[in-house]
């Protein structure tokens, strides 16, 4: 009988430890650095192919890119134990290593609209930090933000939904377009087929859901794309059940693109794991993430 108790105790203990870790992991923030290089775009086919590129690095030392961003996404303020103060400290740290050209927010302030004020307070603290450092703060809407009206103003960032700004390369002074696309939400979703800018300059696109690239016309695909939405799966399950069972509408994960850096028909794409948790405050093998993004032409 004692042997039976021991046999049962082992898996029970492992399950308990896994549950405890799922509650701890949302507090463990990764600050990564990625270098995005411009590739030759392939607009000959509408179908998207996915090629995995090298993983992000924890090395945040100085380098010499054309642009340098600090990217975070998917706040989901209801389930985000990463405080604004902690995030601002990471922004200051990144900026002290080498100046940032902008701080970028990739959408999803909230999961439920009733928490909007808390989300605005968080992002306003980030905005104040950016103003203190003299760094522009840009943001877009996520699929949970569609019920929020004019969220950019109370959140304190410059809204990039369906618009663009022109930035200057720190290397040679050439122009680079930073564009954004809005998210209409999961219900009655409307995908964009064109970019908001007809610029002949290199384009960096900030869009919440990376599936957006599938719906852009081939000639409209940007040179670089920054996204979130997928949370890295949030809970890494066997056989990618987090996507095959729970999030069946997301297409890129079934093509192998969940988190990190990819080449998609010549568009260099980065998908962030985001800061917060959707619906439940659990993560498993998918740490919260903020990222220093270096753009190289």
Image (tube, helix red, strand yellow):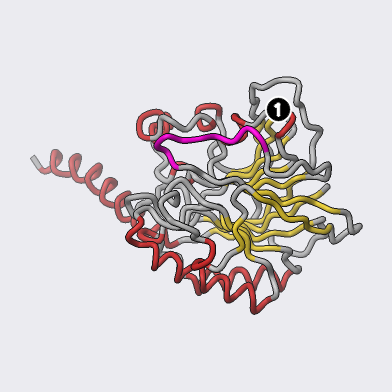
- Residue at image position (27%, 46%) is 15
Decide if residue 79 is on the left or right side of residue 83: left
**How many C-alpha atoms fall within 10 Å of the one at disc 1: few (<14), some, or many (≥20)?**
many
Residue sitting farthest toward the left: 1
Q: Quadrant of the rendered structure where residue 207 is?
A: top right
Question: Which residue is identified by label 1?
Answer: 218
Residue 187 on image: x %, y %: 39, 37
Judge whether 239 appears above or below 167 on screen: above
Decide if residue 121 is on the left or right side of residue 105: left
Residue 237 on image: x %, y %: 39, 37
Question: Which residues, given as a range, are shown in magenta?
Answer: 185-194
- Residue at image position (36%, 30%) is 245
Decide if residue 89 is on the left or right side of residue 287: right
Report the label total.
Answer: 1
Residue 214 on image: x %, y %: 60, 29
Q: Is residue 187 magenta?
A: yes
**In terms of secondary structure, where does tag 1 sit?**
helix
Q: Does the magenta stretch include residue 72?
A: no
Is 117 in front, or is 17?
A: 117
Residue sitting farthest toward the bottom: 132
- Residue 22 in sight: no
Decide if residue 117 is on the left or right side of residue 127: left
- Residue 221 in sight: yes
Residue 111 on image: x %, y %: 37, 53
- Residue at image position (74%, 30%) is 219
């Amino acid at each position: 009988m004692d042997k039976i108790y021991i046999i049962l105790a082992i898996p029970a203990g492992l399950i308990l430890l896994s549950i405890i870790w799922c509650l701890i992991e949302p507090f463990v923030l990764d600050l990564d650095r990625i270098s995005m290089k411009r590739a030759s775009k392939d607009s000959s086919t509408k179908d998207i192919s996915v090629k995995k590129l090298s993983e992000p690095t924890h090395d945040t030392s100085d380098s010499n890119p054309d642009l340098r961003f600090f990217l975070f996404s998917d706040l989901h303020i209801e389930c985000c134990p990463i405080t604004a103060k902690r995030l601002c400290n990471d922004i200051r740290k990144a900026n002290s290593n080498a100046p940032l050209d902008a701080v970028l927010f990739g959408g999803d302030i909230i999961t439920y609209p009733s928490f909007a004020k808390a989300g605005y307070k968080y992002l306003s603290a980030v905005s104040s930090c950016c103003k203190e450092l003299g760094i522009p703060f840009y943001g877009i809407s996520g699929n949970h933000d569609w019920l929020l009206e004019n969220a950019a103003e109370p959140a304190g960032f410059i809204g990039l939904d369906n618009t663009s700004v022109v930035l200057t390369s720190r290397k040679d002074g050439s122009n680079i377009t930073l564009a954004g696309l809005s998210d209409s939400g999961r219900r009655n979703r409307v995908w964009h087929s064109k970019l908001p800018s007809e610029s002949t300059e290199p384009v960096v696109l900030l869009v919440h859901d990376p599936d957006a690239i599938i719906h852009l016309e081939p000639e409209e695909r940007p040179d670089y794309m920054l996204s979130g939405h997928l949370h890295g799966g949030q809970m890494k399950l066997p056989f990618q059940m987090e996507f095959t069972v729970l999030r069946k509408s997301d297409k890129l994960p079934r093509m192998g693109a969940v988190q990190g850096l990819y080449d998609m028909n010549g568009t260099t794409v980065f998908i962030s794991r985001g800061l917060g948790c959707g619906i439940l405050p659990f993560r498993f093998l998918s740490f919260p993430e903020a990222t220093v993004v270096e753009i190289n032409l």
